[in-house]
Amino acid sequence: MTASQRRDFITMLVATLFFGAAGGIFQSTINNYLAEIHNFAAEGRGWLEFPRELPGFLLIFVAGLLLIRLRETQIAALAMALAAAGALGLGFLSPTTFALVVWIMLWSLGDHILFAVDGAIGLKLAKRGGEGRRLGQLGGARNLGTIIGVGLIFLLAKTLGNDFGLFYLIAAGFALISATFYFRLRVGKGDPPSRRFVFRKEYKLFYIISALFGIRKQIFLVFGSWVLVSMHGVPVSTMALLYFIAASLGVILRPLLGDVIDWLGERKVLAADELLLLFVCLIYAFASDILPKPFDLWLLYGAYVLDLVLFALRVARTTYLKKIAVDAADITPSISLGITIDHAVAMSLPILSGYIWTHWGFRWVFLLAGAIALAGFFICLRIRVPADSQGAPDPLPEPMK
């Protein structure tokens, strides 16, 4: 690894750490914020996911426009600036539901743009055959940032109460620091530009897996935490503590899971993820039936933490795409299209899930998710990467050692 490559890697780690801190604050507080400040119920929470995920659905077009003028590192810096503006709006300029939706969409736009490019940046910082390890290391840095963010929120909530303005002010500050470090990155500066739009039949399984991830993400980020907040009255401090525990585990486990991806391959890892997800679904559906209080809540805490940790395996989608990519210029736009596909599902499913919850009960939401996870298991078994495949050529002038 040259001095410039090492410098870029350290800069990327710091940028990712502060991104994790900002994201951790948002994710660990948003459901309490909606329930306590804006009096959302389950069905309304489901409907909110449509505008919140709309930027993800439109990402293929947004990323295409940005790629005309900017490289991935500059796009990442812009994304964090947008997220900072959204956090400030949530904290101080959301007196109505309409304003709330606008600022959540702005945060979401920055968040989704970053997820479209940070994997591609990470791949450029990886040597061949070590893509999972590198993305796992970056994921560990993100989790360390999450520890910092949610740990701070836990302390503030315990000492000052639920001051959401202060929470989102801190999140905005972390996002702006992240933007500064992303802007300083020079990796990929001399690379040919990425394509604006890619749709290849060779990537069809990647697109299907992206849709499955959209289903999984929305049901658990929205309704997994909603079980804890609305049905068990779990406060902000406890939600932050759960994020803190999951993030602490992630600092260690994410790099190890990256190694597991490189060792076992994407097929086995993603299939195992779907089986574990089925197990989590069953816990959410039946924990309170099989265990008395408070043991049912403790089991739900465990399921919530396990699901957050399992999100680390999503990098297997990115490494799989790298290995089957026809051209390195396909990677960023293909990731963007994958996010658009996962949001085409994610925008509508929470509405259906909220309706199911309201009319038939929460249990059926997780039984539906479990059925989808089981189908996903068989779909992931279809993944095939040739044993000698190294994917598209690396754009770096020399591979990292």
Image: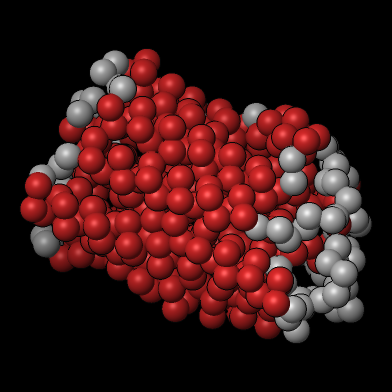
Question: In the picture shown, does residue 27 fall above or below 340?
Answer: below
How many marks on residues? 0
Question: In the picture shown, does residue 74 fall above or below 140?
Answer: above
x 71%, y 58%: residue: 186
When asked about the image quadrant of residue 293, the answer is bottom left
The image position of residue 172, as x and y in percent, is 38, 42
Question: In the picture shown, does residue 40 fall above or below 327?
Answer: above
x 37%, y 45%: residue: 173
Q: Quadrant of the C terminus?
A: bottom right
When asked about the image quadrant of residue 319, the answer is bottom right
x 20%, y 48%: residue: 236
Name the one closer to the observer, 313 or 12. 12
Name the one closer to the observer, 188 or 140. 188
Q: Is residue 46 left or right of residue 180?
A: left
Q: Is residue 333 left or right of residue 288?
A: right
The image position of residue 5, as x and y in percent, is 71, 72
The image position of residue 346, as x and y in percent, is 54, 37
Is there any visible trace of residue 133 in the rendered image?
yes
Name the one closer to the observer, 194 or 234. 194
Colour theme: secondary structure
Name the one closer to the observer, 346 or 365. 346
Is there any visible trace of residue 346 in the rendered image?
no
